Image: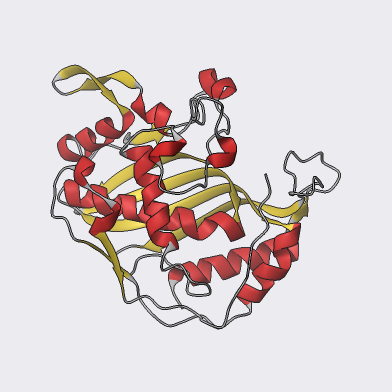
Amino acid sequence: MTEADKNFIETCKEIIDHGYSSEGTGVRTRWEDGSEANYYSIVGVSNKYDLEKEFPMITLRNQSKTVYRSIDELLWIWQKKSNKVADLNSHIWDQWAGEDGTIGKAYGYQFSRKYDFKTKEGIKSMDQVDFVLYLLQNDPASRRIMTNLFAHDELKDMNLEPCAFGTQWLVKEGKLHLILNQRSQDMLAANGWNTMQYAALCYMFAQVCGLKPGTLTHNIGDCHIYDRHIPLVKQLIEAEPVDCHPKLVINNPTKNFYDFKVEDFVVEGYDYNKDIKLGKIPVAN
């Protein structure tokens, strides 16, 4: 069993056994047939992953290809700083695309904005991603290395407000630790996805800055399972996890974050329960 399996199982059990029901609260989300997509949720989840020990992958289901799609989306946001769905090598954002082919002023758009930051050399103009990298390389003891995508002045121009909206980066004894803050998470559809992609980001930033990956702490505000997902989640948490310790290998020695490509990443030592076949998972919109 991986740490990802353990955290997933424990969180899902807590939601199923003690979660709040959204019925009667006027939920925004709908199923494809137009009916309310209700859910059960818990408040204030914090899961931690030791990235030196293993790369956080769930073995209860097959994530051998999902991991690369998740990294692709991560690079679309953090590296390409794009809000154009055509720049993404999957169709996960198609439903949120406007007539202009973008998701509005969300995610990558926010990382493309430049600000005047105070540095040791004076005021410098750069975006949030470059400022994080600057501080990690020039002021690693700082406790102010943070990003924020929840720009209140432009929420009205976003086709979907950011779910994973904030990060904090901390360097301790040569290790890079990442705290990811997320306002809302669909456990079945997105939990493994988000932990894998932000763990990969920590690996990338650590390599670029001459550090070792430390821990990923994933804080979730509203952590939920949709009603039609409950039988599928029960199938997963009752399944037999695989005893393995996945490792993420980056086959690119670059010190430039903007040189990384999805093809540079290889997961070694990963296996999964091949008896679990969930079929097509209903998606709430």
How many marks the image carries: the answer is 0
**Which of the two residues, 48 or 227, is positioned nearer the viewer here?**
227
How is colour applied across the structure in the image? secondary structure
- Which residue lies at the image location 44% right of the left edge and 59% below the top edge? 48
User: In the image, residue 201 lies at what x, y percent?
Assistant: 32, 50
Residue 204 shows in the view? yes
- Which residue lies at the image location 14% right of the left edge and 46% below the top edge? 255
User: In the image, residue 54 lies at what x, y percent?
Assistant: 34, 69
- Which residue lies at the image location 56% right of the left edge and 33% below the top edge? 161
Toward the right, the furthest residue is: 24
In the image, residue 120 above or below residue 234? above
In the image, residue 151 above or below residue 284? above
**Which of the two residues, 209 or 277, is positioned nearer the viewer here?**
277
User: In the image, residue 55 lies at what x, y percent?
Assistant: 35, 65
Find residue 121 and report its image quarter.
Answer: top left
Q: Horizontal placement of 59 versus 99: left or right?
A: left
User: In the image, residue 184 lies at what x, y percent?
Assistant: 59, 45
Q: Horizontal placement of 56 versus 280: left or right?
A: left
Residue 216 shows in the view? no
- Which residue lies at the image location 72% right of the left edge and 69% below the top edge? 231
| Image quadrant where one finds the C terminus | top right
